[in-house]
Amino acid sequence: MKSLEKVQALEPWDFESLPYWSKVLSELGHGLIIFDEDYKILAINEQTASLCGDIVGEDFSTIFNEKHLSNSLPVTKNLTDHFHGIYELTKEPHTRFKVQGFPFFVGQKLVKLAIISPVQVEQDIENFKLDHWENQLQILYEISRATQLSPKLNVVLQSALNAVIDTFKFKMGAIYIIEKGRDEDTWDLLLAAYKGFGQELYNHVKRFSVESKQLESIKKTFAPRWLERKHIYFPLLRQRMRETDINEILCIPLFSKNTLLGILYLTNDDPMKLSAEHIPFLISLGRQLGVAIDNAQLLESISRAKTELEISFDAIQHNIFVIDYNYSIYRVNRATRKKYGRLEDIIGRKYYQVIYQAEDPPPNCPILLCFLTAKPVQEEGEHPRWGGYYQFHAFPVFSTSGELERVVYYEKDITEERKMEERLRQSERLKSLGTLATGIAHEIRNPLASIHLNIQMLSRELELSEDQAQMMEDIQFEIKKIDKIVKQVLGFARPGKPATTENDLNEIVRYCYKLTRTQLRKKGIQVSIELEDELPPIHCDFDQIAQVVMNLIINALEAMPNGGELVLRTFEEKEKHLIGLIIQDNGTGIRPEDQNRIFDPFFTRKAHGSGLGLYISQQIIEKHQATMDFESKPGVGTRFYVYFSKMQQDGKKAEDGDE
């Protein structure tokens, strides 16, 4: 025979108070039966065994015959239904029982729990009702049911409090949760559920603090206490108790795993006043509520951690995929949805169909390598779908048994970072070249001045023939030419300090167009000017920025020897606080192998070019703390971008780079 005390060893149930109730009901002559939706009896207590024999494993509906009386509810297969009535043993028709049954949660398992009491006289049949102990079991059931129906702590506690007060007909009650106070030796009691009083009293009692030593005695036994009205701390509550003829409050510690989690306060008034003989029930009630608080707080912390994780997951600005062992996409973040499209077009599809737009993964795929090796994989290169330069990371995710379960794939667009790194490297190279050019120019200029002076003296002091005089003039002309080149090199190495004022970028573009429109018309180039209205002003040197724009327009003109289309466009990127200029042509484009060299000094593919135009333009742009970038395809054309920051409104930062 399977007794209720031993059932926990055979089934995964953890309802702590059932053994206690089994013993209590046995002493009072009540039997306890637990059965499932198929009426199979799972467990009985000692009293049931003495009344009915060993019936564990048998069918409840075959052991008992129901007597259909006017006040009875028949037993059904639905575990959520209540039932009650007068039943008799099938084998002993004259042995009758009062039976009260209701659904009951044993841990996470829903079962049917029936309380049976022998019928002594016929009058018991007519006066069939729940007794005091059955009410107590009903309360525990309601607490268990509330825990199962809602994971929210406030809902569970309010439902449990309602069940206690409604069953025992108490006038008021409250449940407090215990939290660590601000001071090291204090604890705060926070009102989590209440019934029987209004807003005024709620505001009066919603929070209070106690010293740690006041809780230590409660933690020793977790036994309930009865407080007389005169010992109540809150004056308004004492007044309310006097008005409603309440003399004492019952304090029930709520605990789980020897940890005090809260306190249940009940006004212990008639008609069902609780006394010391009910201490076992009250401890079980405190334990059950404590377990409910513990579970709900655990669920809330898990839910909160999940929410925070989801927020963090979606806050990452790079594409993240979670891919299962079938190569199907299990989850993505918000950035991925923005980049790849609707969620329904991503989730459940094979990752290579979405990322690579192919029916099979390529052999160098980091995701495939991660699945094959069960090790992290990191690669860099051009994105197979979006272009640009990306970092690709694939991380294995293992199950608790150590099996590879999923792969987290992360891709980061580092195109702009690489461009910035290249610009910094180029800037360092140019700075070194500028320093070198300055040194060389000075070294040439000093002896050149001496040569020039000596030639002038010789020309005056010597009697020269006509041919010799012409030779002297040629020497002086070439010396002046060299000196001019040296001055240019010094200017190229260190462009002049920008004289920044507030200027309209649209006006600079119009000015440069007027200077070049004749040449553009002669070359058969159509010009489209798209200037944004009400563009904020920029702080810049008008002449220097005009020099940059002129240089870019001339480069575009020379890239379209047979005519074409030139676009001059200004715009504002409000989110990035930028003001931009685009100069775009549909000319010959820049060779891929040349695109990393166009800002180098003296680099050119033109027959008569100096190779200094873009170098000087870059220097000027850097002096203004602006940026310049480009994109180009041979045979398609080139587009240059120049960005000025709106944040730089004082015109001073552009001078910081000057030495």
Image (cartoon, rainbow, N blue to C red):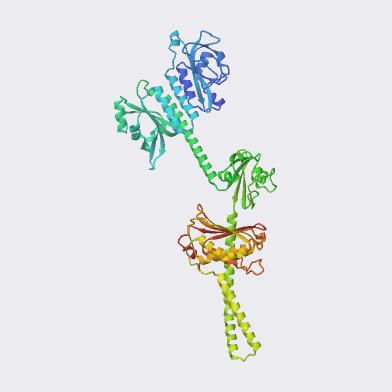
Q: Is residue 430 left or right of residue 233?
A: right
**Residue 365 visible in the picture:** yes
Quadrant of image for the N terminus: top right
**Residue 599 visible in the picture:** no
Extreme-bottom residue of the structure: 463
Q: Please state the horizontal and vertical placement of residue 608, each as a whole percent of the image.
A: 65, 70
In the image, residue 565 sits, relative to residue 44, either above or below, namely below
In the image, residue 284 sits, relative to residue 31, either above or below, namely below
Q: Please state the horizontal and vertical placement of residue 43, each as a whole percent of the image.
A: 54, 20
How many numbered discs sit on the rendered protein?
0
- Residue drawn at (39%, 32%), measured in percent from left and top? 218
Q: Please state the horizontal and vertical placement of residue 467, each as a whole percent of the image.
A: 66, 87
Q: Please state the horizontal and vertical placement of residue 122, each as a whole percent of the image.
A: 45, 8
Q: Is residue 480 left or right of residue 504?
A: right
- Give residue 443's quadrant in the image: bottom right
Of 420 and 616, nearer the camera is 616
Of 114 and 72, nearer the camera is 72
- Give residue 203's quadrant in the image: top left
